[in-house]
Amino acid sequence: MSETPNDAAPTNIVWGVVNDIMFWSKIKGGLKRTGYPLRRIRTDLELMETLKAETPGVIIVDMGNDAMNAFAVVQTLKEDERYQSIPILAFCNHDDVAAFTRARSLGANNVVTNGVFSVSMDDLVKELMEGDDDEL
């Protein structure tokens, strides 16, 4: 059996790679208006296993997720031909300039601070979901 993901087109499901339950609650509330279904992914193993069966429309990655190496997740997704077209929205603490810079250099489509993410997550996700990233 093949280890590649299914051949189906990307879904409109937004995956949140978020371990923090409080931030997950914010994401659920903030993205409610978009109408996109959400799936919470807690670990890198869960992410890779779920990718074998389904392709999300956007992946949101909390760069401060203690349950995984978020940088390795972004790097793996962007280096693998099977996954590199999946848009990644990464967020991190405003004072963690190194995380911000590293996430961007690894290929995250957009990297924002936690504050910007909290206020604008619906617009940020819509832009990536619709492929309208001219202003990012």
Image (spheres, rainbow, N blue to C red):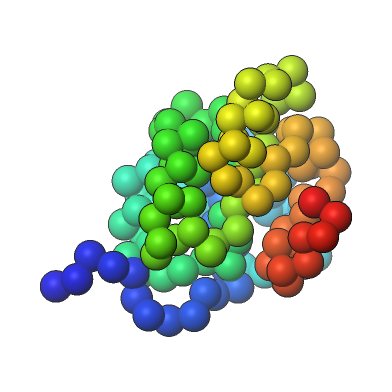
* Image vertical order of residue 62 relative to residue 86, above or below: above
Q: Position of residue 48 (x, y in %)?
A: 35, 53
Q: In this orientation, which residue lies closer to the viewer: 21 or 91?
A: 91
Above or below, 62 against 8 in this view is above
74 sits left or right of 120 in the view: left
Task: Farthest residue to the top: give it.
Answer: 95
Q: Residue at x 70, y 47 (%)?
A: 110
Percent from the top left, x then y, of residue 96? 68, 20
Residue at left offset 80%, top offset 51%: 136
Is residue 122 shown to the viewer in this render? no
Does 17 sit left or right of 114 as displayed? Answer: left
Residue at point 54% right, 75% down?
Answer: 11
Where on the picture, by quarter, is residue 101?
Answer: top right
Q: Quadrant of residue 59?
A: bottom right
Q: Residue at x 77, y 60 (%)?
A: 133
Indicate the position of residue 66 as horizontal and vertical percent values. Answer: 47, 27
Nearer the observer, 118 or 93: 93
Q: Is residue 91 left or right of residue 4?
A: right
The reply to whether residue 124 is in sight is yes
- Whole-percent x, y for residue 45 in the image: 32, 46
- The residue furthest bottom is 8
Q: Quadrant of the N terminus?
A: bottom left
